[in-house]
Amino acid sequence: MVAEKKQGTNEKQKALINALKKSSDEEIMAMLIDLKEQGELFYVRTLLEILSENRSELLNKALVEYLSDIKLQDAVKIISDFVSENYADKDVNDIVLVSWQSRLDFSKHLDPYIQILINANYKTAFEAFTVIENSIDSLSANELTQYGSTIKKAVQKSNRDKQLLLLEMISILEKAKRAIE
């Protein structure tokens, strides 16, 4: 009985994901209302994929707002894994924006944001800067040191604007480290 119910749930989830993938922008926006009431995370990756496709500005705005409103900490791993897997070849600016706007704790999943800070364009790097800055209070001295040295290695290879951003992050990390030592 429990296995049958779970299988039925999995089928419904698959159907919903397929519907999201095949729907128009307007249909997806209408579906977001129903998804909000469910309070589950199985469809978050699909929404992130749609957001990274840069569809209509109206849909992107609705998706950013929807994803930013998720308050389940389990969403952090889904979001950061997606960023990690896709930042090199997809536009993840809006997804990084969602990361800091959500106010979830990304401190255990900062590696992709450090890489974006170092390697992405200035706009996306600035969004990653905010994610990292919001997570600093949850980092250990060792993590602060590790991230700081990773960023220091990248400063010379960056353009002037990016160098200033990286140097500011190094300063923030060092200040946070002094505060906990």
Image (tube, helix red, strand yellow):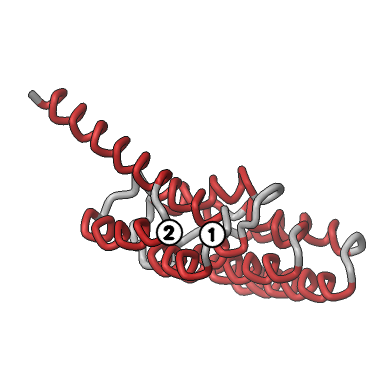
Task: Name the amino acid, label 2.
Answer: Asp
> 41 above or below 96?
above
Location of the C terminus by quadrant is bottom right
**In the structure shown, which secondary structural element does the residue marked by tag 1 occupy?**
loop
Mark 2, Cα crowd under 10 Å, few <14 / some 14-19 / many 20+, is some
Task: Name the amino acid, label 1.
Answer: Arg
Please give the label number shown on residue 55.
Answer: 1
Report which quarter residue 132 is drawn in: bottom right
Relative placement, left or right, of 116 versus 153 is: left
Q: Residue furthest left?
A: 1
Can you give x and y, in whole percent of width and height, for residue 23 in the image?
Answer: 39, 49
Please give the label number shown on residue 13.
Answer: none
Relative placement, left or right, of 97 versus 64 is: right
Query: For the point 68% across and 71% down, which residue is it?
Result: 126
Relative placement, left or right, of 158 versus 26 is: right
Tell me whether the residue at label 1 lies in contact with that at label 2, contact meaning CB atoms closer than 8 angstroms. yes
Nearer to us in this view, 13 or 132: 13
**In the structure shown, which secondary structural element does the residue marked by tag 2 occupy?**
helix
Query: For the point 40% across and 50% down, which residue is it?
Result: 44
Nearer to us in this view, 129 or 43: 43
Q: CA distance from mark 1 to mark 2?
A: 8 Å
Can you give x and y, in whole percent of width and height, for residue 95 in the image?
Answer: 54, 60
Q: Which residue is mark 2?
A: 25
Query: For the point 30% across and 57% down, which residue is it?
Result: 31
Can you give x and y, in whole percent of width and height, for residue 11 in the image?
Answer: 25, 31
